[in-house]
Amino acid sequence: MISPPVPAELVDHLCRQNDLTPTQATRLIEEVLAFYDESSAAFIQRRHYELQKAGLANAQIYQMIAAELEHRRFKLDPLTERQIRRTIYG
């Protein structure tokens, strides 16, 4: 997937407001956009892995993921624990 070009005025703004070169500002913008381009399924699977590695039990993980989904860029209807499990395990 090809990313749209980074707006020059945003690059200029970041350079003026921070100690960044145009290359650094462009890279920062691309990283932020990539973070928010993550699909809901990819987010659920990534967070499950991260929280599992942190030692949390699945029941707690499912509740945390459901709460975090409400604050992400993608809008979803609330997911049940079953839907979250099915996204993780297929």
Image: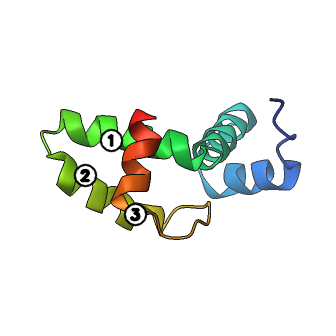
Q: Could you tell me residue 67's position as x and y percent?
A: 36, 67
Q: Nearer the viewer, residue 69 or 59?
A: 59
**Residue 36: x and y, percent?**
61, 50
Task: Say if mark 2 contacts mark 1, CB within 8 Å.
Answer: yes
Res. 73 mark: none
Residue nearest the viewer, comparing 46 with 20: 46
Q: Identify the residue at image location x=85%, y=49%.
A: 7
Q: Which residue is mark 2?
A: 61
Q: Is residue 50 left or right of residue 11?
A: left
| Residue that appears at 29% across and 55% down | 62
Would residue 31 be found to the left or right of residue 16 on screen? left
Say the numbered circle drawn on residue 48: 1
Q: CA distance from mark 3 to mark 2?
A: 12 Å
Numbered disc 3: secondary structure: loop
Q: Give the amino acid type for the residue marked by disc 2 in the picture.
A: Ile
Query: Alpha-carbon distance for marks 2 and 1?
Result: 7 Å
Tell us which disc is closer to us: 3 or 2.
3
Tell me: residue 24, above or below residue 33. above
- Residue ID for mark 3: 80
Residue closest to the eye, 82 or 17? 82
